[in-house]
Image (cartoon, coloured by chain):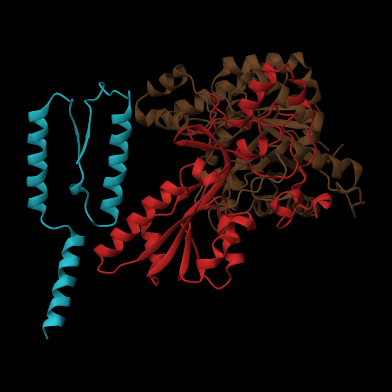
Chain colours: A red, B brown, C cyan
Amino acid sequence: MITGTPKPIEEIMEMVEPYDNIILAGCHGCVTVCRVGGEKEVQVLASTLRLAREAGGRTIKIREVSLERQCDPEYVEQMRPYVGDYQAVLSIACGAGIQFLAEKFTTTPLLPGINTGFLGVTERQGEWSERCQGCGDCVLHLTGGICPVTRCAKSLFHGPCGGSVQGICEVDKSVKCGWQLIIDRLKALNQMENYTKFKPFKGWSTARDGGPRRIIREDMI
Amino acid sequence: MKSGSNLEKVLAAGHFSVTAECGPPRGADPDIVRKKAAFVKGNVDACNVTDNQTSVVRMSSLAGCLLIKELGVEPLIQMVVRDRNRIALQSDLLGASAMGVRNILCLSGDHQKFGDDPQAKNVFDIDSMQFIHLVRLMRDEGTFPSGKKLEGAPKFFIGCAVNPFADPFEIRVPRLKMKVTAGADFVQTQCIYNMKKFKEYMELAKREGLHEKVKILAGVTPLKSAGMAKFMRKMVAGMDIPEEVIARIAAEPKDKQADKGIEMCIEQIQELKEMEGISGVHVMAIEWEEKLAEIIGGAGLLPRPVVE
Amino acid sequence: MVVGCLEGDCHYVSGNIRAKARVKRVYGILDRIKIGPDRIRMYNLSAGEGSKFAAYANEFVEKVRELGPSPINLVRAGQARAVSQKEAT
């Protein structure tokens, strides 16, 4: 899923400073799974904002909304009948969802309530970690199912570097060395020849480096 | 001759070679480089100029190389792939070669989190293995990776670094083999304190015949004090300093520790001279360049041979 | 006032531990929005400790009385006074 972390409440307070009547929009997709932008989080944030405003001698009206997804037009359109009645929308969906709302409701200011993070997995409730960079040219079959672009801090294709100590990356004690993981997996799969194979230069043009990307399915248009 | 560099000639003639390291200054003052070069001159076959080591911004390696070259010291440019994409790397290779730099060390580079600019963008467009391949391609095929011909191929004696003390140990020699296959002509190792582990590494390397395919220069760093040893062991990733080494220097009173460190370094070089498969030594006397003559001379390696 | 079982004795195994973490989060939120964390507190009791419950409840009520009206109630009271003053004039 796409993960994110809540923006500090002070930053959100500053963003909503000019407004007294807003929509707070959550999403039932990824951000619900990583507990940052679902219905429950909408309720907690709305309550927090109301209390904080009132303690400062003002009020704020917040319409709490939770869409199935903020990245598909059908669900976003559900807001159209009432979005014009509000001064701004504070969204705690991922950056894609927030931007999509902004595109659809061009005269309503869109405020991001979370900092969108990475494509990741749930290690356990409360802990999520990064797995994929969306490089557009997947090589997981060559590296035992572990991504060198994402899980190696230097995106090496012939790692590990000299800073790998006891399976830990030089960047931080909590970060496992991606290449140690790859080597261990290749050994378990009896595929060590994949390790010594020379890998030609990575083509980054399929990644974000080539410019904002687009996928078209001819058979669906 | 692949590059015609002095280091290549000295090694080809069968001498035990010596290289050292110069860290450029954290500023634009060329005299700092010149002062270090003065200590290096006459004591080495080539001198490395580091490239923003530990991600701390310093004067560029190429500039440092040109400054020492002016004073008659053979430069060895270090290039990391941390900060430059393949376009900049190729361009810098052509520039360095045009300016007469004939030795290069191809490195990954420490992660930018270690320096003063941890917010910097992470480049790593190609890795050090692919970089070695790139330099060899341009030198030997005379083309860009695209296949287009170069208006003058760069001439480099290509080096790589290895750390026999990093994990996992079992892939360290296979990785050296990959670097040799990619095109490395010489290797400089991370500084050695654990001679036992290093000998294990060399045994495995010799089994693959690597000592005959590539020139291995063993890295040494003289210890200034027991404190320095403890600091390095704690703070530098992939540094292996055995307890006996620390105990030996710590046994001296504080004001005698530096001399002991030099003595231990000289002993170590003498031992390395006798080891099969070791073609030279890389003396990293960081911020202690003034001791180079004493160390290299003390190990019986002066004067340096002049090979035409 | 949030009440949970004694630690180690939770009928739902670790529900009281989860609750503790969540109460701590609420402290943090209330503190950061300057309401102050002291108006919420968690106590651990077993179902049979009726008199302890009464004691804790009294203690907490006293504590809250000492703290006086919450910042929000102060604001609301001030606004109510302002409104009634306005109406009087």
Residue drawn at (73%, 42%) of the image: B104
Between C67 and B91, the residue placed more toward the observer is: C67
Q: Is residue B296 left or right of residue A93?
A: right
Residue A135 at x, y = what percent?
A: 70, 45
Residue C40 on image: x %, y %: 21, 45
- Above or below, A164 against B87 in this view is above
Q: Residue at x 15, y 81 (%)?
A: C87
For residue B236, say whether it is visible. yes
Total numbered labels placed on residues in the image? 0
Residue reaching furthest to the front: A81
Whether residue B11 is situated above or below residue B91 in the rendered picture: above
Q: Give the answer, above or below, for where B211 lies relative to B152.
A: above
**Quadrant of the image occupied by residue A81:** bottom right
Instruction: Find residue A175 and report its horizontal and vertical position in percent.
Output: 52, 33
Q: Position of residue A89 (x, y in %)?
A: 48, 64
Quarter of the rendering containing residue A78: bottom right
Foreground residue among A115 and B161: A115
Q: Which residue occupies the foreground of this view, B5 or C45?
A: C45
Query: Which quadrant does the N terminus of chain B fall into?
Result: top right
Residue drawn at 58 percent across, 25 percent down: B166
